[in-house]
Image (spheres, grey):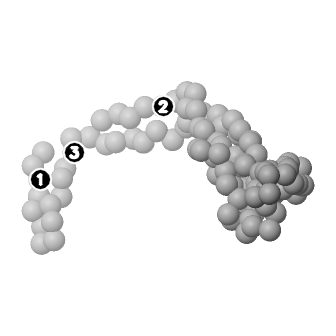
Amino acid sequence: MPDVLIERGVIHQLGGLLHPVLNWCNASDISIQSGACVDCSLNISALPCPEEFSPFVPARVQHLHCSYEAETGELVPGCNQICGHVPTVRLAQFGSITV
């Protein structure tokens, strides 16, 4: 079918209808990991998460459940942020696109 030129662009015509896929069956598996142990006086947003992990919103922080090495070299109680990673795995597709 030919394209139609209009005042503000072009209308592209298709020879049939596109039917979108509406039903997906996905699975998500949440991985939870603690970030590095740091000084509890730091701002919560400054607490690091491991690579590919994100902080929960609102932030979840463990207080005094870990220890880190202070500038003096001694181990002192600290805080770490609980972080999550949610990869989505597409399991199956029901339906198809037809033209």
> Label 2 crowding class (10 Å Cα cut-off): few <14, some 14-19, many 20+?
few
Residue 67 x/y as whole percent: 84, 49
- Name which quarter of the figure residue 46 lies in: bottom right
Which mark is on residue 95?
2
Query: In the visual, does 18 lie left or right of 10?
Result: right
Which mark is on residue 14?
3
Q: The C terminus appears in which quarter of the rendering?
A: top left
Nearest the viewer among 73 and 57 is 73
Label 3–label 1 contact, CB within 8 A:
no
Residue 43 x/y as whole percent: 73, 69
Residue drawn at 58 percent across, 32 percent down: 89
Nearest the viewer among 31 and 75 is 75
Q: Residue 32: in sight, yes or no?
A: yes
Residue drawn at 26 percent across, 40 percent down: 16
- Name which quarter of the figure residue 61 lies in: bottom right
Residue drawn at 79 percent across, 52 percent down: 73
Above or below residue 26? Residue 44 is below
Which amino acid, mark 3? Answer: Leu
Query: In the visual, does 18 lie left or right of 32?
Result: left
Above or below residue 74? Residue 90 is above
* Element marked by disc 2: loop
Residue 35 x/y as whole percent: 72, 48
Residue drawn at 87 percent across, 54 percent down: 76
Q: Please give the residue where the numbered disc 1 appears in the rendered image.
A: 3
Find the residue positioned furthest to the bottom. Answer: 7
Residue 6 x/y as whole percent: 12, 67
Which amino acid, mark 1? Answer: Asp
Nearest the viewer among 21 and 70 is 70
Is tag 3's residue or tag 1's residue first in the polypeptide sequence?
A: 1
Nearest the viewer among 73 and 69 is 73
Q: The N terminus appears in which quarter of the rendering?
A: top left
